[in-house]
Amino acid sequence: MIESNASKISKAGVLFQLIGNYLPPEVFDLLSSEELEILLDRLNNPGKTNARQEKRILSEFNEILSGDRIRHATGSESGIRERILRELETLVPETRKTTEIENLRQKNKEDLSLIISGEPDYTIALVLCFSDPDQASLVVEEFPIAMRESIIEEIKNVDFHSEKVKDDLERFLIFKTNAIISDKNHIKVKDPGSKKAAELLNKISPNLSQDLVSKIRKKNPGFAEDIGEYLFSMHDLLKIGRNGLSKFVEKFHPIVLACAFRGVETSVREKIFSALEPWLLKSIILETDSMGPVSLAEIEEAQKGIIEKLQDCVNRGEIKLWKVK
C-alpha cells in the first residue's frame, strides 16, 4: 500500500523533533509546498511519541536513504540524496554511540547537583547509581542525614537490568539537560511547536516561507502569530543594535552579502547599509558592482545562510533584537 503524504509528513514531523537542526536543508528542499504545509500543521499538533515509535521512524528513514531509491536515483536528486546520506551517517550514528546515561560517568559533582535538584529520592538514587561513584559520594555528603538514608534505601528498589528503567532514566536526563541549558541561556519557549515550525521555515526559501505563513494565518491566526515570534528575515537585521550589526555582518564573505542584499527592498537595504561600518559597506558595494547577473535561487541561498546564522546567534543569546520604531 502506498503511504499517504500526510502519513509521510507525520513521520517527518517526528524525525524533525528528534534531530531538529541537524537535518540538512536539502531535506526540506525536496518537499513540495503542500507537504511543508502539512508538516507545519503537524508541528502545531505534535502529539506524543514513545521510544519504540521514535526508533521505528528513524529506522525506516535510514532504510529509505540507503535503499534502492538512492542507488538508482539520477541527476541532481541523486547528488542531494547522497549528501544527505553522508551527513546522516556522520551525525545520527554519532548521537547513538554515547547515551545520556553513559555521559553521567563524565559529570562532576556540580553537574550532578543540577541534574538531581528538586527531584524525588528515587530519581536521585537512580541518577547517582549510574554516575561516577567518587562524584556521586560527594553529592550524597551534602545531604542531611535523614535524606542520605532515604536515598540509600531507594537504591534497593532500582532494577539495574530493566530496559524500561534505563529508558525512563535516559528520557529524564535528556529533559533535565535541555532544561538546564535553557535556564543558563535564559531562553523561554512558550510554544515549542511554533519554534520548531519557525526553524523549519528559516531553512527554506524566504518567498516560500512567507507564502506558507500566509496560508497558515488564514487557517490558524494564533499559530501564525506564534511562529512569527521565532521566524527571521533579512528585515530583522534592522533590529540589531548599530554596534552589533557590523560584528554580525562581517561574519560573512562580501560576495554572500552582495548576493543576499540584491533580494532586499531598496529602502530596507539602504537603512541596513547606513548602519554598517564604512569599510564593511565599501567591501559589499565593490562586490555588488563587479557581480554579474544573479539568479533568484542564488539570492535565496545566500539569504538562507544569513537568516540561519541570525537565528542561531539569537538563540545562543549572542544577539538581542530590538523593536524598530
Image: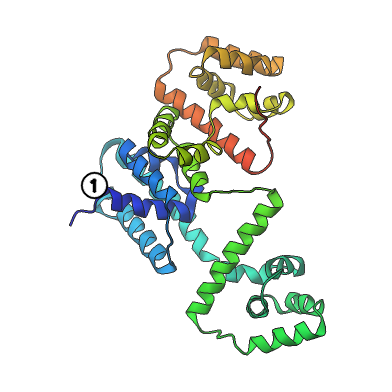
The answer, for residue 150, to whether it is visible in the render is yes
**Count of labels shown?**
1
Location of residue 45 with respect to 152 vertically, above or below: above
The answer, for residue 90, to whether it is visible in the render is no
Residue 129 in the figure: left or right of residue 201? right
Quarter residue 230 falls in: top right
Residue 253 in the image: state x and y as whole percent. Answer: 59, 25
Quarter residue 83 falls in: top left
Say how the picture is coloured: rainbow
Residue 244 in the image: state x and y as whole percent. Answer: 71, 29
Nearer to me, 163 or 93: 163
Residue 26 in the image: state x and y as whole percent. Answer: 40, 40
Nearer to me, 118 or 317: 118
Q: In which quarter of the image is the N terminus?
A: bottom left
Location of residue 301 with respect to 273 vertically, above or below: below
**Callout 1 amino acid:** His
Residue occupying image coordinates x 51% and y 22%: 260
Residue occupying image coordinates x 72% and y 86%: 150
Which residue bears the numbered disc 1? 72
Nearer to me, 194 or 96: 194
Q: Quadrant of the C terminus?
A: top right
Residue occupying image coordinates x 55% and y 30%: 306
- In what element is the residue under mark 1? loop
Residue 167 in the image: state x and y as whole percent. Answer: 51, 73
Callout 1 crowding tier (Cα within 10 Å): few <14, some 14–19, many ≥20: few
Residue occupying image coordinates x 44% and y 48%: 44
Residue 257 in the figure: left or right of residue 153? left
Q: Which residue is at the far left?
A: 1
